[in-house]
Image: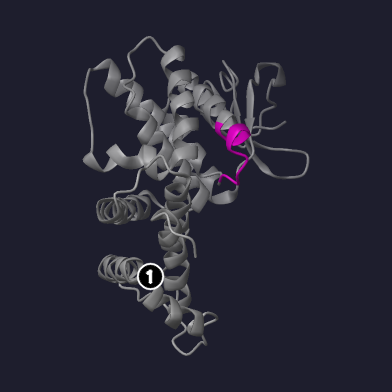
Amino acid sequence: MIARKVFNNNSVLSRDDKGREIILLGGGVGFGIRKNDEIDERKVEKVFRLDKKASSKFQTIVQETPMQYILLSDRVIRFIKENLGKKIHDFIYVTLTDHICTTIERAKNKITFDNILLLNVKNLYKEEYEVAVKATEMIRNAVDVEIHDSEASFIALHIINAEMDGDMEEIYEVTSILDEISDYVLEKFGASKEEIYYDRFIIHCRFLLQRIGGIQEKDKESLFKHVLEDDVNSYEEEWACVEELARIIERRKHYCLDEDEKFYLLIHLVRLHGRQD
């Protein structure tokens, strides 16, 4: 392999046999070589093949981040992928690697950071949070500093971000809205966060919020128009809750739920409230 760019003593940019851009990491892999020099492949410890967007940003990360943190982040990300079984965008190598490095340095200096928004991440994103707890333990075991348990909430949000291929600002907004919806429904119906129907309701709301943002089809015919009209009378309390949730979403996302979207919310709320539809 030929060096296309030498970042530092431990990282080099090259291409594989198919012409794809790759980033090579290894102790001394870049030491004493220049552009167009042959790379000593015996020194390569890790090869990163990322999409173009992620690769460009990751090149900055490898130049500024200690190699041991990059390799640790890679182990964590591979663990996340293997245990979630979901499509994870390559950009997680940029965002989570940077976050893990910052977290370790912050912990070394005993700097704590918390956000009230993170308190409910455990309930809003249960599957991702469980994986994040184990990932946090991996980081804690790999470095000689104390990593606070709250780190799992941050990692869970980075996982969600990679699943959505969005940005952290959007994730924080969705999480904040989910938090408001959850608090309202739990207070209104006295439901428990441990109920399976609560989980299903939150997952439905999460994906609803994630796909909101396109042009609304104002003239489309509702699939459930007549059923909805009947259920308004049968489930007045749940329907009133649906209307309040619609107002929350309209206020926070500037989006008006259509009749079908309201109907699906109604189904989840009826089940959560312990009644059969």
State the residue position of label 1: 235
Name the foreground residue: 16 vs 88. 88
| Residue at the (71%, 16%) spot, across then down | 42
Name the secondary structure under disc 1. loop
Residue 214 image point, x, y percent: 45, 73
Q: Residues within 10 Å of mark 1 (few under 14, many from 20)?
A: some
Q: Residue furthest bottom?
A: 219
Residue 131 image point, x, y percent: 50, 31
For badge 1, the amino acid type reads Tyr
Question: Magenta span covers which residues?
Answer: 80-88
Left or right of 59? Residue 124 is: left
Left or right of 119? Residue 88 is: right
Q: Which of the 4 image quadrants contains residue 64?
A: top left
Check the image and report above or below for 25 versus 17.
above
Left or right of 218? Residue 74 is: right
Number of dots carrying numbers: 1
Q: Residue furthest right?
A: 17
| Residue at the (60%, 46%) spot, across then down | 87
- Asked if one can make out residue 215 in the rendered structure from this viewpoint, the answer is no
